[in-house]
Image: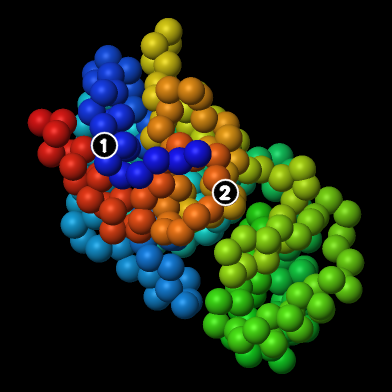
Amino acid sequence: MHHDETALYRRLRRMPPAMVRPWLWVFDFDGTLVNIESHPNQVMVARPLLEDLQQLTQLQGHTVAVISGRTMTDLRGFLGSIPRLWLSGDHGAEVVGPHWHWVHGSAAASTHHFAHLAPKLSHELSGLPGVYVESKRYSLGIHYRLADDETTEALKKTLATMSLPSGLAFKHSHKCIEIRPLPGPTKADAMAIIRNQVQSSGVGSVALVFGDDQTDEDMFNAANRKDITVRIGSGTTITGAEFQIDSPHRVAALIHWALATSN
Ligand SMILES: [Mg+2]
């Protein structure tokens, strides 16, 4: 059961101030902070949003994290200009914050598989128009946003006959099939790690978690009762999030509102 934006703002107004109980903002990236584009490289972070995020990291009691399926290199390219921002790439495989760097054990142990698999798959799938293999250190993404239905079918058939090295598994997300270590890191692992680093002793923190995708559900499900969880997207979705809002545009508006009301 999830509620609309009005209910979300009502709830935010009732939150304990961040000076009393620290707020941990957790954002997914694609589809949450920025619109999904047909190719991941076409994404742009609007300057006002960058400035708002930076301001939010500078507010006392507020910590901001972006936890994404993208590589850390990618995330730094988009958000690296914000020094106090926490970043987690490859779905929780790696977490980087101010004076902090952590890599998930099974992810670190499987890097040689991905180095080997990426060129092999790129070659095998090169005949499928609109399919794009994204090579990452701790996982591998096969994107098919640009592929037509027939090609998508062919892709899924090819992958179904493929055997993966032990310790790796396919995971389906929005217009992308990933190959990831098993038992792999999840975004919830990254969230827990960041939470441990930022909450002051005895007080705890309240997390505000925003995501649009299946992999974000791990974070929603790991949230505490007092946290705020928000699924981005129109239409009806089965989600563990308490609230739903329409689009990245509305997320940006909410961040802007939070800044305005904190002064
Ligand atoms: Mg997303």
Quadrant of residue 180 in the image? bottom right
Indicate the secondary structure of the residue bearing disc 2: loop
Q: Is residue 108 left or right of residue 241?
A: right
Identify the mark at residue 43; answer none if there is no mark: none
Q: Tell me where residue 223 appears, x and y as whole percent.
A: 52, 30
- Residue at 55% in and 77% down: 145
Q: In the image, what residue occupies the spot 53% across and 53% down?
A: 237
Placement of 161 over or under 219, stated as above or below:
below
Amino acid type, residue under disc 2 in the picture: Ile
Residue positioned 25% across, 63% down in the render = 46
**Quadrant of residue 207 within the rendered picture:** top left
Which residue in the protein does label 1 denote?
Answer: 9
**Of pointers 1 and 2, the one earlier in the residue sequence:** 1
Foreground of the two, 5 or 160? 5
CA–CA distance between discs 1 and 2? 22 Å
Q: Is residue 48 above or below residue 228?
A: below
Count of numbered marks: 2
Residue 215, x across and y down, in percent: 59, 50
Which residue is drawn at the image coordinates 42% and 8% (left, top)?
202
Q: Secondary structure at mark 1?
A: helix
Corner quadrant of residue 123: bottom right
Crowd band around label 2 with a 10 angstrom C-alpha radius: few (<14), some (14–19), many (20+): few
Q: Which mark is residue 238?
A: 2
For the C terminus, which image quadrant? top left
Q: Is residue 80 visible?
A: no
Q: Is residue 222 left or right of residue 251?
A: right
Residue found at the far left of this picture: 263
Q: Amino acid at mark 1?
A: Tyr
Residue situated in front as seen by the camera: 14 or 69:
14
How packed mark 1 is, by other alpha carbons closer than 10 Å (few <14, some 14-19, many 20 or more), is some
Residue 152 in sight in this render:
yes
